[in-house]
Image: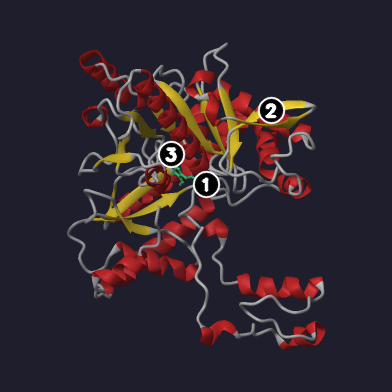
Amino acid sequence: MPLHTQVDASSRDEELDVNPVYVHELGTEIPRYRLPAHGMLPRGALQVVRDELILDGNARLNLATFVTTWMEPEAEQLMAECVAKNMIDKDEYPQTAELERRCVNILSHLWHAPPGSQATGCSTTGSSEACMLGGMALLWRWRARRQAAGQDAARPNMVMGSNVQVCWEKFCRYWQVEPRFVPMVPGRLHLRGAEAAAQCDENTIGVVAIMGSTMDGSYEPVVEISQALDRLQAEQGHDVPIHVDGASGGFVAPFLQPDLEWDFRVPRVSSINASGHKYGLVYPGVGWVMWRTPDALPEDLVFKVNYLGGEMPTFALNFSRPGAQVAAQYYNFIRLGREGYRRVQQACRDVALHLSAGIAKMGPFELLTEGRDLPVFAFKLRDDVTGYSVFDVSERLRLRGWQVPAYTFPADLTDTAVMRIVVRNGFSMDLANLLLGDLRKHVTVLEHHPQTQPPPEIQRVRQSFKH
Ligand SMILES: Cc1ncc(COP(=O)(O)O)c(C=O)c1O
């Protein structure tokens, strides 16, 4: 969450400017940064907060986020009914715990955990927490192996592409693991096998492979990475496990690319995470993490909570969490089934391919991906387009509420500025055609009115997406 700082003395006593219609009813002023001395009636409070929130963007038009922005009314009702249940109180809410257990089992099946392997998993607040847990298990296992062999365990590292989501940088910083980033280069926008293996040594706790990249929606080749690590093991003896960050793809590949091997079918994959609140189709925040076998998850990371007179093992960074998202995940599973998920994800892919083809035909743009892996694609302006930038295009699209982020790639492609569209459930073909029409119009305007580009410090502020 953003860190907020105490406001300075000149703002401390500011009051909210409330519509005069409500002032009479409220009968009181509302300090902006201090707790009011007295409360107010619910209707007034609701209106004051709603009035403030009208400036937020329209979530359905937010094409930057991977996170669910539409669920059907029945799911919303179920969530409202479950919001007061605390996930951690397994003893008090045993059926919510049971739904979580069923979801873990459904996912272990979808991700091809070998029968009888006792694959183990849990829900989390999202993929970030799930990645932290996955990374911690890798770190603990590596450390135990080194210590058991009487070897130095002071300098762990983790190998990943520079296109990883920021949660992996956080993991490395918080747990003091050296991040070894394989840079992006023109023509290679994500991690490949040879480059991953070249960065590994005896201190590598694991390699992160992403399904798919936050930057452009492409899948990293898990089998190729695994084979490169097999060769490394044969030549140098380092046995390096893979964690698959399937934040989005964990809920897409099983339905759209069922024959693609990226999950527990690949023996070197020891753990997988996914966001229930992305293509799992649940409102934020729910994620999932799963380990191939119980011994992939070291025993001393597990805490026990009361459950039906006994104890239930848990692994989490936080304690309390609403049960609503887990109930909604289970609702989606039984509501949609395998075929329903396939249809939803296929519709997203159809829209993504239609949009990317339309953008490619427009003239000034060049696609970096088409939306064939995740229904997500990135595009840039052709090198000979100099009169305006992707930041200008992004800003103009906002005129009608479209939020299409523009940003620069990470190392070593920091000079490449792109736009990215994430197609999610609820973004229809009709909306896609309206977006194409608007984009065409803005491009024509920009071609007739070349823009002066601001200095880099302002340009940085214009970047509408920080992964
Ligand atoms: C590949 C990848 N990993 C991890 C995350 C973090 O996920 P969450 O927002 O569920 O914490 C994201 C978010 O976009 C992502 O794309």
Q: Earlier in the sequence, mark 3 or mark 1?
A: 3
Q: Residue at x 78, y 78 (%)?
A: 38
Q: Give the label, 1 or 2, closer to the camera.
A: 2
In the picture of the structure, the residue carrying the numbered disc 2 is 312
Which amino acid type is marked by label 1? Answer: Arg
Callout 3 crowding tier (Cα within 10 Å): few <14, some 14–19, many ≥20: many
Name the N-terminal-most of marks 1 and 2: 2
Q: Could you tell me which secondary element the residue under label 3 belongs to? A: loop
Mark 3 vs mark 2: give the one in front: 2
User: Relative to 177, does residue 312 appear above or below in the rendering?
Assistant: above
- Residue at image location 52% in from the left, 74% down from the top: 6
Residue 389 seen in render:
yes
Q: Which of the marked residues, 3 or 2, is nearer the chain's N terminus?
A: 2
- Residue farthest along the front direction in this orientation: 150
How many angstroms separate mark 3 from mark 2 (CA)?
36 Å
User: Quick check: marks 3 and 2 in contact, CB under 8 Å?
Assistant: no
- Vertical comparison of 285 with 400: above or below: above
Residue in the picture at 53% in, 53% down: 430
Q: Position of residue 80 (x, y in %)?
A: 75, 50
Q: Position of residue 433 (x, y in %)?
A: 47, 55
Which residue is under mark 1?
424
Q: Which mark is residue 374?
A: 3
